[in-house]
Amino acid sequence: MTKRALILVGTKKGGFILDGDAERRDWSLRGPLNEGWPIRHLAADPRSGQIYAGGGSEWYGPAVWRSDDLGASWTHSSEGLTYGEDGPAIETVWNLTPAGDTLYAGVAPAGLFKSMDGGRTWAHVTGLSDHPSRSTWQPGAGGLCLHSIVPHPSDPSKMWIAISAVGTFATEDGGTTWEPRNTGVRADFLPDPYPVTGQCVHKLVMAPGRPERLYQENHCGTYRSDDAARTWVSLEDGLPSTFGFPMVTHPRDADTAYTIPLNGDSTGRYMPAGQAAVWKTTDAGATWTDLRIGLPQEGAFLTVLREAMAVDTLSPHGIYFGTTSGELFASDDEGATWRTIAEHLPSISSVETLVTDA
Amino acid sequence: MIEVRLPSSLVALFPGTARRMTRPDAATVLALIEALDADHPGMRDRLCEPGPTRRPYVNLYVDGEPAELDSPLHPGATVHILPAVAGGAGA
């Protein structure tokens, strides 16, 4: 059966969906969706084809939207998405990650919620918020956000999450208890650059087929772990900057990952020298190669946020990224060449893909 | 009975909801919102934060005067729910 890809784009003014043809050359844009709400994350469950949107309206608060028809129609709910009447108000939903029959949501102020009914009702995973370090959690520039949720592919008792600016945590008992796993990850903005918690993880991802391997892009470097995040090694040699947001892995190769370094946390946070590039490793971060063909190389002061890059599962795989200035770039040859496939969108918060039958 | 006026941006989230409606008497604005929520599940969450308190950029008016969730309602009152002009700064 011929397959096609959809690109799911979360923006400050609603979700957008690009429908691709079988060759990934022609893309048709739909949106804005979700009543134009700021959408932090538009993501799909590849098992069911359901699409979820997480975000928050300044007027009406946070909610999770759901579509059962590839974005043609939507419902929304925030039932149970609360810290209780005595708790702080949840500002927005940062991340939605399906894991089997469970849908997880990461929110700000940082916390983890789970739904067993496709986002209609939610329950707080209190074990994380009960961690003894909770009183020390400090926000990053984007707020105190739980932005990365990484379920183990086959063991539902294991999961990793990441919070800015608190670090990576892991559970091995289904979320009842959690432990920080930040050994080897720098926090240059703290007096002890290697604290137990306090790191500003920007994005945490798992290597395909190797659940003990994770990669992270961080405010202070790029890292890999091969022991389920217990220890981390630096991968920043060969990259033009120690600051970047997104990180994605190849859909099938555990040694291949992509990142987009920016020029620094206090010097503009745009592509180094105003030249757009995606950086690729095929040896688990030992070396990096810049990919630029088809990307603007002059005056490209572009910023790509942590959730705004994605691959599809086709072969060769496609890779896509969106900028805060509303451009969407695509490659159908694993980054060798690039095209602009959308412009003038609102500021892009997230990019994901869904592969369906054509 | 209570006259209720809802904004277009709110009714858009609850298809089929009228912007102008007449509701049974309610003791307070919160009681009115909870009755609306019974007919339109999820509406309370769109208007109220933990406390409960009204969301910061949702303005409530009773007979044209600024109100809060605990403001009393008398039979014949008119309640306006309006998104604040200050909201949406991040848009």
Image: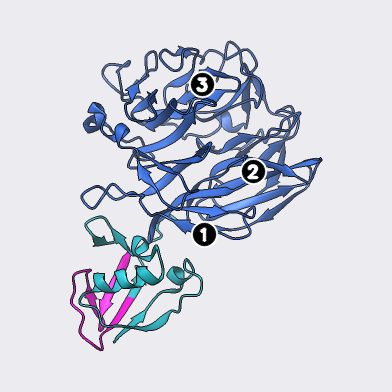
Chain colours: A blue, B cyan
Residue at image mark 1: A75
Residue at image mark 3: A215
Q: What amino acid is found at the position of numbered circle 3 in the picture?
A: Tyr
Q: Residue at x 39, y 36 (%)?
A: A146
Please, which chain is the residue tagged with disc 1 on?
A
Marked residue nearer the N-terminal end (1 or 2): 1
Instruction: Kindly report the distance in space between the C-alpha atoms of the residues bearing marks 2 and 3.
Output: 24 Å
Marked residue nearer the N-terminal end (2 or 3): 3
A14 w.r.t. A262: above or below: below
**For discs 1 and 3, the disc positioned in front in the rendered view:** 1
Task: Indicate whether residue B66 is drawn in magenta.
Answer: yes
Label of residue A328 in the image: 2
Q: Quadrant of residue A354?
A: top right
The stretch of residues the image draws in magenta is: B55-80
Q: Residue at x 46, y 17 (%)?
A: A228
Q: What amino acid is found at the position of numbered circle 1 in the picture?
A: Thr
As rendered, which of A71 and A203 lies closer to the eye?
Answer: A71
Please, which chain is the residue tagged with disc 3 on?
A
Residue A216 position, x and y percent, is 48, 23
Marked residue nearer the N-terminal end (1 or 3): 1
**For discs 1 and 2, the disc positioned in front in the rendered view:** 1
As rendered, which of A339 and A30 lies closer to the eye?
Answer: A30
Residue A178 position, x and y percent, is 33, 25
